[in-house]
Image: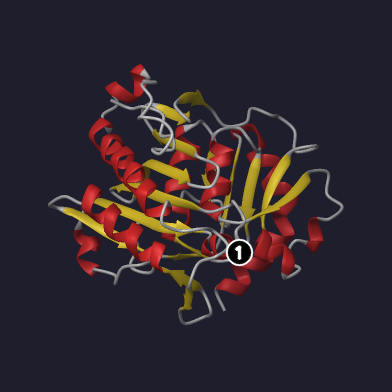
């Protein structure tokens, strides 16, 4: 049974169930995702965003006790025999490359925002089958938002059916940008564009918002790892939107090297206009990534 995931301290798991989620061929996967996300409520109740002890990994990326605790909880609730595992907070077990079914997770996407007390971080769970992201779940503990779905049944946002934007023109579209990329000046080229740009943390959370039609587009021309985007990619595609690489090819997962050149995602009718608007930037980015 699939229900709204809400704050466990305030409400019991709500009984809002959709027929499509129950009859999905991925219903067992969705059950596990939902259980895993619910298990993180207690973990996050131990921490106060903005007042969290932080260590730093190579490359100056922050990591907290919450990252590790959530990673352990997700592994416990999700992983079964004959399934692979790829997580930002786990040593890469390369046996995943021989598995058809693989979990690709980021226990805490947006750790910088979590550390700073900005409510733009989330737990991100993607499920991959034969190299294709087919199901996902994302939970923002700060806003109590939950996004859940699979390619054969659609997406729910806090238990209610949702779908990606059906806007047909790029003009006036809401595009979610990486706060870090904006700070580095990587979005200056788009300051006078016909679309609105809103800077936010967590690429997974941005993809989730796009999947629910709460924004029209998100893209990054900066390399991302599979664990950053696979859950969100599964949700956007499940909600009727598009996801593609900077080379305008289908996104594939469970690669030996999990680093992707970048990502474009949005409402299905916006893909052509977006590719056209980004054309020169995409060519430069792709060429640079191959050097």
Residue 16 versus residue 129 in the image, above or below: above
Q: x%, y% of residue 109?
A: 48, 58
Which picture quadrant has residue 215? top right
The way the protein has been coloured in the rendering is secondary structure
Disc 1 crowd, CA 10 A, few/some/many (<14, 14-19, 20+): few
Residue 19 versus residue 119 in the image, above or below: above
The residue sitting at 22% across, 53% down in the picture is 76
Q: x%, y% of residue 249?
A: 50, 51
Residue 225 appears in the figure:
yes
Counting labels gives 1
Q: Nearer the viewer, residue 118 or 236?
A: 118
Which quarter of the rendered picture does the C terminus lie within? bottom right
Which residue has dot 1 on it? Answer: 116
Q: x%, y% of residue 117?
A: 60, 59
The residue sitting at 50% across, 72% down in the picture is 62
The residue sitting at 58% across, 52% down in the picture is 120
The residue sitting at 37% across, 54% down in the picture is 43
Residue 88 appears in the figure:
no
Q: Nearer the viewer, residue 154 or 285?
A: 154
């Amino acid at each position: 049974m699939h229900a709204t995931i809400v704050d466990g301290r305030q409400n019991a798991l709500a009984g809002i169930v959709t027929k499509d989620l129950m009859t999905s061929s991925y219903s067992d996967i969705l059950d596990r995702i939902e259980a895993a996300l619910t298990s993180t409520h207690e973990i996050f109740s131990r921490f106060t965003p903005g007042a969290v002890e932080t260590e730093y990994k190579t490359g100056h990326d922050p990591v907290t006790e919450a990252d590790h605790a959530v990673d352990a909880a997700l592994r416990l609730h999700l992983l079964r025999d004959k399934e692979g595992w790829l997580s930002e907070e786990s040593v890469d077990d390369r046996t995943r490359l021989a598995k058809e079914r693989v979990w690709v997770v980021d226990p805490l996407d947006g750790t910088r925002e979590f550390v700073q007390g900005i409510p733009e971080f989330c737990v991100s769970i993607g499920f991959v089958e034969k190299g294709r992201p087919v199901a996902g779940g994302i939970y923002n503990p700060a806003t109590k938002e939950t996004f859940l779905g699979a390619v054969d049944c659609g997406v729910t946002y806090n238990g209610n059916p949702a779908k990606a934007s059906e806007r047909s023109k790029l003009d006036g579209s809401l595009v979610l940008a990486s706060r870090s990329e904006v700070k580095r000046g990587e979005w200056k080229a788009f300051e006078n564009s016909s679309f609105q740009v809103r800077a936010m943390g967590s690429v997974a959370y941005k993809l989730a918002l796009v999947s629910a039609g709460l924004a029209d587009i998100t893209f990054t021309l900066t390399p991302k790892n599979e664990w950053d985007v696979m859950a969100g990619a599964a949700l956007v595609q499940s909600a009727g939107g598009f996801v593609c690489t900077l080379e305008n090819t289908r996104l594939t997962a469970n690669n030996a090297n999990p680093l992707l050149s970048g990502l474009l995602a949005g409402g299905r009718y916006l893909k052509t206009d977006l590719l056209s608007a980004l054309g020169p930037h995409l060519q430069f980015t792709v060429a640079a990534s191959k050097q």
